[in-house]
Amino acid sequence: MIVKDDRILAVCLLAGKMMIESGSEMYRVEDTMQRIAYNAGAAHCETFTTPTGLLMSLGESRVQILQVTHRTINLEQVERINALSRRFAVHEISLGAFHQALLQLNREAVVFPAWLQLIAAAVISSTLMILYNGVWFDFPSTAIIGTVGYAIFYFGKQRWQVNFLNEFFASLAIGLLAWAAVRLHLGQRLDLIIIGAVMPLVPGVPITNAVRDILAGHLLSGLARGLEALLSVSAIGIGIALTFRLF
Amino acid sequence: MQEVGTFCLQIGFSYLATVAFGICTNVPRRALNACGLTGAAGWIVYWVLFQFHLGRMLPNLLGAFVIALVSLFFARRNKIPVIIFNIPGLVPLVPGGLAYQAVRAFVLGQYLNGIQYAIQVAMIAGALAIGFMLAQFVGNSRLLHWHR
């Protein structure tokens, strides 16, 4: 029985940690952890989750902590853990198989290839530029500048071990390139080119999650997430602002 | 005729932008199309209302409301977490342009202008949140329980 309780705790905490790392809202994290414990036959459990770590207790005296050190956005991961939890709930897989599947997912996360993400960044930049009343003349230059910005953001995240540095350099490059494009008569509306090209970098997921966490009563998580989003918005803003100062 | 063309362009481009953002945030492949439809529905509601000169708040609120409802529908139909649809769907409505104007005004020393833009950004973010809240309220009520 003792061994089984340890296993339940391990599975719940790992699932919760992976969901926080992938950018899930806190409500869903706690709900999933409690469902897993309930379906595994645990009598009573309490969870406490924040974006930087989570705590769970089973029964009277059994408590474990897990720290969360990095957070990215991978909605597919959230969906897979959710699907595994549903399969566990209808007894399609055992607790051991569930644990193995989670460990496997943790080792090799499923992501879209880099080239596809770069094309997607080009599409986001250019289409949103048009939706925000841009001119068709700027379409190609916005697509290219947006791609370069996202490439710096994406590869910088893996290379440099400093948070927010990649966002800063990406937006600085966007500002400089947009200015150069307008100067070389490859673009007309500097403002809209920059807004379009910055859109793939904007931390939409953390902001949305922060608001939802706060509304759901997870004040601590909402504030922490909101602060993280505010810092990356500032990094982007300073990168753009430097361009205005230089010219 | 030109209006019809613009209308189709708005739908098509908001669909594309949402799907592309879904690729960047690694949405499951089978949900990408539904993501695009969610984003297009929300944006077109916002855009049409904005054309009727209803200001910025009401169109944003109703746009977010529609996004949340449509994603709730897709989430229940496909048994997928709702955030997979409403996070990419919200992207066209994010007040990026106003935030940019605010930063620019602050850097150029026009603090009053900057504060004005910043307050608008905060109010739009609030309108989006209220739109989501209303949809959650409607979704939790008995009206919209397709199946469970």
Image: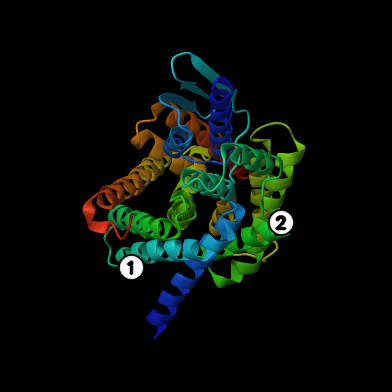
> Picture quarter containing residue A14?
top right
Q: Is residue A190 visible?
A: no
Left or right: A244, with A210 as reference point: right
Q: Which residue is mark 1?
A: B48
**Res A113 label:** 2
Q: Most extreme residue toward the left, as rendered?
A: B142
Question: Which quadrant, please, contains the C terminus of chain B?
Answer: bottom left
Q: Most extreme residue toward the right, as rendered?
A: A159
Q: Amino acid at mark 2?
A: Pro
Q: Is residue B120 visible?
A: yes
Q: Nearer the viewer, residue B96 or A190?
A: B96
Q: Most extreme residue toward the bottom, as rendered?
A: B1
Counting from the top left corner in percent of width and height, residue A116 is at 68, 60
Return the chain for callout 2.
A
- Relative to B66, residue A29 above or below: above
Return the chain for callout 1.
B
**Res A43 label:** none
Counting from the top left corner in percent of width and height, residue A104 is at 68, 42
Tell me if mark 1 has few (under 14), some (14-19) or many (20+) residues whose alpha carbon lies within 10 angstroms of its own: some
Which is closer to the viewer, label 1 or label 2? 2
Q: Nearer the viewer, residue A173 or B115?
A: A173
Residue at the spot 67% in from the left edge and 62% down from the top edge: A119
Q: Nearer the viewer, residue A246 or A200?
A: A200
Residue at the spot 71% in from the left edge and 45% down from the top edge: A108
Left or right: A180, with B24 as reference point: right
In this figure, which colouring scheme has been used for the structure? rainbow
